[in-house]
Amino acid sequence: MRRFHTLRGRLTALALLAAFVALVVLTVAFNVVLGRSLDAEANRRLRTQVAAASTTVEFPNGRLTVRESPDDAAIDQRMWIYDGRRAVIRPRGQAALERSADALADRSDVFVDVNDDVRMYAGALTHNGRQVGTVVAAEPLDAYERTAELALLGSVGLAALLLTTVFAVTWVTVGRALDPVREMTRSAAEWSERDTGRRFGHDPRPDELGELARTFDGLLDRLAASLRHEQRLSAELSHELRTPLARIMAEIELLQRRERPIEDRREAHEVIARSAEQMHRILETLMAAARAEARLDTGRSDVAGALERVAEEWAPRPGAEGVAVEVRPPPEPVVAGVDSAVVERIVAPLLENATRHARSRVVLTAAPQDGRVVVSVADDGPGVPAEARANVFEPGASGPDSHGGAGLGLALARRLAHAAGGDVTLAADAPGHGAEFRVDLPG
């Protein structure tokens, strides 16, 4: 029975059921029509016999006489002729037939079945417009019944043979039709694990299989692109985490080797703190993305409050001390359908990126839009060069004035936004007005 849980089994069962219903209807209809035809044939023969016997009856002087009996002796044995209710011709036979024939005297155009194996018919003999006698004929039904039984057995046997043939042909045909699909599925699964560069290509196939091949190719393309992106992101993360860790280890080693002036120690401590904070931000962003992807960090948050906390926690990087961060509160409360920590972790890398390039100011705003929440991080810097806009969110991407960044902030921000059901996009630059990044979040 497990086979019928597969598509092949279900299609075969459906074809078998349809064939079974059709054959049952046809078999029943054939046997009903045949039975009625045989019944009509028996009646026709009886009427013919009565008509033939009627030609031998004469009425000289108004009295019924039989000129001669029918030529066929077998017919003579199954024929009764009555003058009124008096039998003129009465073959000797079964008593039940004789009683039934006597009961049909003086009746006209009447059929009676005796013991379900003999049918009798009474036909009127008329003279001067009135019935003066009756002819009764009998016809055995054994031959008709045998014909009907043989037809029933034959039709049932033929139906069983056809059902077996339908099952075998459907099972084999559907199996062969699904073999290429099964092979393509197996190949796609194997390539997705071991060889993501393999594709089905444009080999000639039936339309349905060609569409399936194109779907598989598109799926493998997206899978390969995702794997490449993840590998690149992992490599860039490793590099980004290794760099501050190396700085921390180098500063600690220098502090341990020799005594240093207070200013040098303070500077070393600041380097260690900044490097640790950089690592902390990266790890927090990755943890927030993991929680959002697992849907463990969904909730509601006041976006304006989250922006205020990001601005308060922002510490100017070296060279960005003169940049001011301004949070413009919305005219009405704006609530996002994600946790506040997720909002902060998305906006923080964008804010850090904006302060790197801003001349004097970065503006944070939030507003509802079509049931969503849009957060804007805009700076008054030179903007994103046209040649860099296409890959600005790629891991490791950096412009000529990247200030030593590893190019992971925007990639991590977009990754986290996607995990939370949103996105991060770069708005069209207005000449002389810097860059603006927009965060789209569920409302």
Image (cartoon, helix red, strand yellow):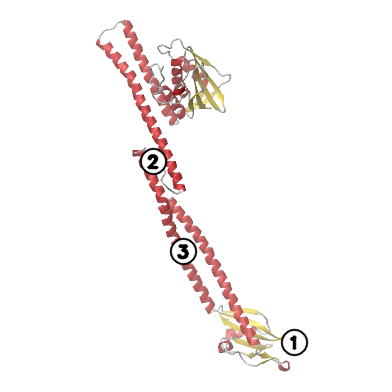
* Mark 3 neighbour class, 10 Å CA radius: few under 14, some 14 to 19, many 20 or more: some
How far across and how far down the image is residue 36, in percent? 58, 72
Give the distance between the C-alpha atoms of the residues marked 1 and 2, in whole angstroms: 99 Å
Secondary structure under the numbered disc 1 in the rendered image = loop
Label located before the other in sequence (2 or 3):
3
Three-letter code, disc 1: Asn
The answer to whether 60 appears left or right of 387 in the picture is right
Give the distance between the C-alpha atoms of the residues marked 1 and 3, in whole angstroms: 61 Å
The quarter of the picture where residue 35 lies is: bottom right
The quarter of the picture where residue 112 lies is: bottom right
Label located before the other in sequence (1 or 3):
1
In this rendering, does residue 4 appear at all? no
Three-letter code, disc 3: Leu
Total residue callouts? 3
Image vertical order of residue 51 relative to residue 415, above or below: below
Q: Residue at x 53, y 65 (%)?
A: 26
The answer to whether 39 appears left or right of 129 in the picture is left
How far across and how far down the image is residue 302, in percent? 52, 22
Secondary structure under the numbered disc 3 in the rendered image = helix
* Residue 162's disc number: 3
Q: Are marks 2 and 3 in contact (CB under 8 Å)?
A: no
Observer-nearest residue: 331 or 193? 193
- Camera-near label (1 vs 3) is 3
Residue that label 2 marks:
199
How far across and how far down the image is residue 354, in percent? 46, 17
- Camera-near label (2 vs 3) is 2
In this rendering, does residue 409 appear at all? yes
Give the distance between the C-alpha atoms of the residues marked 2 and 3, in whole angstroms: 43 Å
How far across and how far down the image is residue 139, in percent? 57, 82
Quadrant of the frame with the N terminus? bottom left
* Residue 128's disc number: 1
Three-letter code, disc 2: Arg
